[in-house]
Image (cartoon, grey):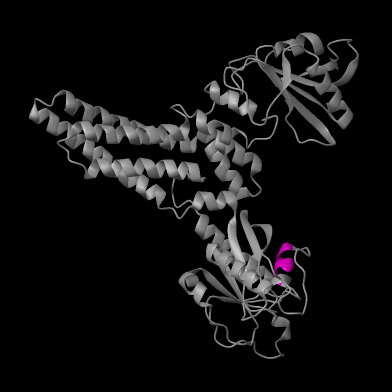
Amino acid sequence: MPPPTETSTIYALSTAPGRAGVAVIRVSGPRASQVLALMTRPRPKPRIASARTFIHPIDSRPLDRGLVLWFPGPKSFTGQDVVELMLHGGRAVVASLLEALSAIHGFRLAEPGEFARRAFDNGKIDLAEAEGLADLIDAETEAQRRQALRQATGALSALIESWRATLLDALALTEAAIDFSDEADVSDQSIAQARASVESLEAAIRHHLDDSNRGEILRDGFRVTLAGPPNVGKSSLLNALARRPAAIVSEEAGTTRDVIDVRLDLGGYPVLLSDTAGIRQTELRVEQEGIRRTLEAARAADLILWLVDPGAPEIQLPADLVPVSDRVLLVRNKADLIKTGAPPALPDDSVLVSAKTGQGLDDLTARLAAIAQDRLDDRGLPAALTNARQRALVADTHHHLCVFLEGNPHEPELRAEDLRRAAHALGRLTGRIDVEDILGQIFSRFCIGK
């Protein structure tokens, strides 16, 4: 991505490529107003959608008719002059407009995420808001949309700034203790006030970190692994829940050799459902590898659906899964094979289904949605940490606060350094300090046109 000092005017298709009813082309930069002078005469009023015929800047031939919006900087998404062209979404129409823009001197096609990067460089958004914007574009479920929108509109940034304000106040008190070190009463009082503020802040940040990675799981998907002995219908259940033949189904035991993933939207929550190889003793090396992958996926899952036949005796989990037995939901499949009469007595906290007939599937999906909702509920937290970068920086901040509290209060110079390091970590989260090394990583996630 070009450096922040880049002064070229950029353009890109901001809507999805391909045939559509309407397409939007965005232009941003110091020469964006040339689009108005060369292609959409007469110039529209700022921030008022105006119908115009789009003409080629070289030979003035008509290209399409649509709407144009003009946002003079700095009151625009990027902080620069911005023009948005709304045109018909046919491939030929879009191609002709993009070719026309390329003919204007100083214009070039935007890189992925370059519009958002310019918005950051011009102070329109911070890094946490930029990450939320990227997550909002990628959101597939209602819960993901809500979380991403809160972050994109500044909920996490506001929380971080409140922490940072408290931290800077404590730092000022600590530095005052240094300045008045020859006055013991003043110095001790300043350090005591700083410690009180840091103790409160440390508790708030610790509480926020102790959220079982809720934000990251919601962003990436609640992982549910189907596991159990061979031939209990794991692949059939995966297909039934996905409502498509995602996995091969066969009466031959050991058909599934690898982990197969499908994404589901259950009650607005993203669920990543994984079909795995049946667990049994075997001499086949390829099946052994499949079982190893099954156990690995199960240990990493947020929930394990342990499938058995309806008449199976007492359930015995493999030794590898005993440590995660609190994340196991027992599912008895093949309810259609139960003879008429009273159904078998089921252990508490288990579900009876038939992947073949659909019996019990509504109960199972409702149960999965409820478990996901309980795990991903915000628990009253104002904003969630949604990725590893954010969590690492908040954890780093917490570490330095703990070092401050554990350190000798009669060494104010060292305690001030602890707080400076904590403030540095928080500043990196929102971009208040030099973070050039991580900007490319964040903005490269965006599509071209954003």
* Majority secondary structure of magenta residues: helix
Residue 41 can be seen in this image:
no
Looking at the image, is 261 positioned above or below residue 123?
below
- Residue 347 lies in what quarter of the image? bottom right
- In the rendering, at what x and y percent does residue 112 appear? 67, 31
Please tell me whether residue 239 belongs to the stretch shown in magenta.
yes
Looking at the image, is 68 positioned above or below residue 394?
above
- Residue 137 lies in what quarter of the image? top right
**In which quadrant is the N terminus drawn?**
top right
The residues colored magenta run 237-242
Residue 173 shown left or right of residue 228 in the figure:
left
Please tell me whether residue 14 belongs to the stretch shown in magenta.
no
Residue 15 shown left or right of residue 126 in the figure:
right
- In the rendering, at what x and y percent does residue 312 appear? 61, 86
Residue drawn at the location 76% of the way across and 13% of the way down: 35
**In which quadrant is the C terminus drawn?**
top right
- In the rendering, at what x and y percent does residue 436 appear? 51, 28
Nearest the viewer among 291 and 404 is 291
Residue drawn at the location 28% of the way across and 30% of the way down: 169
Looking at the image, is 382 positioned above or below residue 335?
above
- In the rendering, at what x and y percent does residue 264 appear? 67, 58
Residue drawn at the location 44% of the way across and 47% of the way down: 381
Residue 217 can be seen in this image:
yes
- Residue 81 lies in what quarter of the image? top right
Looking at the image, is 166 positioned above or below residue 233?
above
Nearest the viewer among 249 and 151 is 249
